[in-house]
Image (cartoon, rainbow, N blue to C red):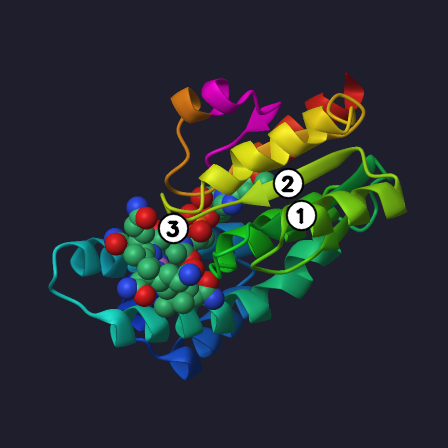
Amino acid sequence: MSEKLFEAMKQSIIDGDPDQSAALAKQALADGMDPLDAINQGFVLGVNEVGYQFGCGEMFLPDLVLAGEAMKAAVAVLEPEMARRGTQRQMLGKVVIGTVEGDIHDIGKTLVGTMLSASGFEVFDLGVNVSISKFIAKALEVNADLIGASALLTTTMVKQRALIEELDAEGLHGRIKVMVGGAPVTREWVKQIRADGYSEDAIGAVDIAKSLVEK
Ligand code: B1M
């Protein structure tokens, strides 16, 4: 039964149909499905397919835009339930999160923020296109333990390195740790820029964040 629903979820993203993706997300919740399963086993497969076809030149920018809208509509339905499931936990630490300057991809970053928040972190989400000075100013203002910097483009990943260099220059790196992520980020890159933590997905990001605040 779930298989059919997962397939329909994937297709709703490929079709770029936000009404359908939101309706399927509501159906998943009504059926008692874990919202993260709906995202990871249903909707994300559609996003990956669109991204793949875009990369091959078989889909175009409007398809990417519509897929993004459909994904956001589904996540908006699922997020409150994800947050609700984590409401009983204790406060683990403060995280300032955002997508780096020049980059407006926000779906993965928002998911990571939601999962951190659901797991007991206090999350300050600065949105997209966030400058290094804004990341640092907010982290100092709220006395954050961690900055989470998301980048989805090979051209904007360099801002993750620049953020760490600026924290180093201001003598703040160590007191404020940095977690990075996003589809183009590799372990090799993480090592090269001396980020404190990295995760491929939102679930892993919670474990990494926990280990970083414990250190
Ligand atoms: Co764009 N885009 N896009 N796009 N887009 C990609 C990223 C691309 C891989 C597609 C492709 O070519 N196959 C490609 C990048 C190529 C590259 O640099 N290597 C690309 C491109 C080229 C572009 C434009 C340049 C296109 C153009 O204008 N010609 C343009 C850039 C705009 C800009 O930012 N300046 C652009 C625009 C857009 C839209 C606005 C249309 C839309 C975004 C809508 C939105 O976010 N509101 C969009 C979309 C939807 C995509 C794809 C299809 C999907 C991204 C997504 O939401 N994934 C994407 C292809 C793909 O990734 N398959 C693509 C779902 C999301 C749940 O996954 O974001 O990876 P993800 O997040 C994951 C993990 O990465 C990780 O956890 C998340 C949850 O599991 N993670 C973290 C993410 N951040 C983390 C932070 C952490 C830890 C883990 O710690 C802090």
Q: Which residue is mark 1?
A: 97
Residue closest to the eye, 200 or 177: 177
> Which of label 3 and label 2 is nearer to you?
2
Please provide the residue range marked out in magenta: 190-202
Counting from the top left corner in percent of width and height, residue 17 is at 35, 79
Which label's residue is closer to the chain start, 3 or 2?
3
Q: Is residue 55 above or below residue 157?
A: below
Whether residue 3 is visible to the viewer of this picture, yes or no, is no
> Which of label 3 and label 1 is nearer to you?
1
Question: Farthest bottom residue?
Answer: 19
Cα–Cα gap, marks 3 and 2: 25 Å
Asked if the beta carbon under badge 1 is closer than 8 A to the nearest atom of ligand 1, the reply is yes
Q: Which residue is mark 2?
A: 148
Q: Is residue 12 above or below residue 137?
A: below
- Verify CB contact (< 8 Å) between mark 3 and mark 1: no
- Verify CB contact (< 8 Å) between mark 2 and mark 1: yes
- Viewed as shown, does residue 59 lie left or right of 107? left
On the image, which quarter does residue 68 sit in?
Answer: bottom left
For image coordinates 54% across by 37% down, the residue present is 160
Asked if the beta carbon under badge 2 is closer than 8 A to the nearest atom of ligand 1, the reply is yes
Whether residue 82 is visible to the viewer of this picture, yes or no, is yes
Q: Residue 193: within the magenta?
A: yes
Q: Which residue is mark 3?
A: 41
Which label's residue is closer to the chain start, 3 or 1?
3
Which label's residue is closer to the chain start, 2 or 1?
1
- Viewed as shown, does residue 188 lie left or right of 31? left
Residue type beneath disc 3? Gln
